Amino acid sequence: MTLQPRERIILALDVPDHASAVEMVDLFKDHLEVFKVGLELFTSAGPDIVRYIHEAGKKVFLDLKFHDIPNTVKKSALAVAKLGVFMFNVHTLGGQEMMSQAAKALGNYALQNNVARPKLIGVTILTSMDQATMKDELGIGLSLSAQVRHLATMASRSGLDGVVASAEEAEALRSKFGKGFLIVTPGIRPSWAATDDQKRIVTPRKALQMGSDYLVIGRAITAQPDPVMALKRVISELD
């Protein structure tokens, strides 16, 4: 199934509380399908904001990047499944057993309850990191692109649906894993938007050309003087 441009954009609700998120959902819900709820908002607003988005007829990408011992992540995955989100993520650096247990638990839950299984994707290397950070601070000797491919391979073997990765790695990942493997790309910045704290960024159109399925966009839209017009401008660029 071919996704329409408005289906590909995941709007990041990078706001501090429930009221601010509700305001943003109401502003954008007629123009896109998926909202991202991250750590700050979920810590503040909890499951209530997920329910609000669902009641608005929209989907949720729950971006909490679970990274813990396998049993804890498995139980957390089941809790997320009960919320009915469209997609959520774990951190691939948690290892193959952690990812496998989460994926198996989701599959069993969906079968037993006759519900749709949430998409489970793995975070590879954050787009705020570059090669120097990875080598000097994390002590990882592989090149950034090789490390992303390695982590994505672990995710695939573990039964995950795809990964979060920069568009810079998307082309190689698409070539390696094919069309069925989801690639969700943050660090998206239209040419007319500020780069903020992201280091590995691309434009929306370029990200699609390089193989990304979903584009996570936040401040590049929400910080504009006319956010809805900015979103329409991005959709037009993708169309």
Image (cartoon, rainbow, N blue to C red):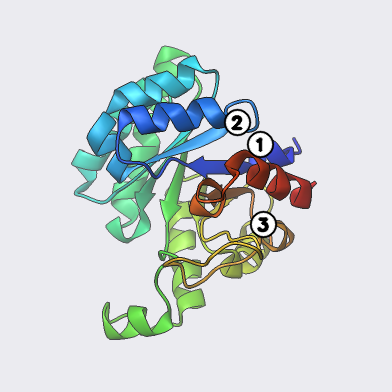
User: Mark 3 to mark 1: distance in Å?
Assistant: 13 Å
Residue 212, relative to residue 121: is it above or below?
Answer: below
User: Mark 3 to mark 2: distance in Å?
Assistant: 17 Å
Report whether residue 109 is seen.
no
On-image quarter of the N terminus = top right
Instruction: Tell me the amino acid under the disc marked 1.
Output: Glu
Where residue 132 sits: x, y (%)?
38, 85
Q: Which residue is mark 1?
A: 7
How many neighbours does mark 2 have within 10 angstroms: few (below 14), some (14-19), or many (20 or more)? some
Q: Are marks 3 and 2 in contact (CB under 8 Å)?
A: no
Report whether residue 44 is seen.
yes
Name the residue furthest front. 225
Where residue 229 sits: x, y (%)?
67, 42
Residue 67, relative to residue 232: is it above or below?
Answer: below
Instruction: Tell me the amino acid under the disc marked 2.
Output: Glu
Q: Which residue is mark 2?
A: 33
How many neighbours does mark 1 have within 10 angstroms: few (below 14), some (14-19), or many (20 or more)? some
As drawn, is 230 to the left or to the right of 164? Answer: right
Q: Secondary structure at mark 1?
A: helix
Where residue 143 sits: x, y (%)?
45, 82
Q: Nearer the viewer, residue 29 or 100?
A: 29
Which tag, 3 or 1, sits closer to the chain's start? 1
Q: Are marks 2 and 1 in contact (CB under 8 Å)?
A: yes
Image quarter of residue 71: top left
How many neighbours does mark 3 have within 10 angstroms: few (below 14), some (14-19), or many (20 or more)? many
As drawn, is 4 to the left or to the right of 48? Answer: right
Residue under the point 61% across and 66% down: 202
Residue under the point 46% across and 23% down: 53
Instruction: Tell me the amino acid under the disc marked 3.
Output: Pro
Disc marking residue 204 = 3
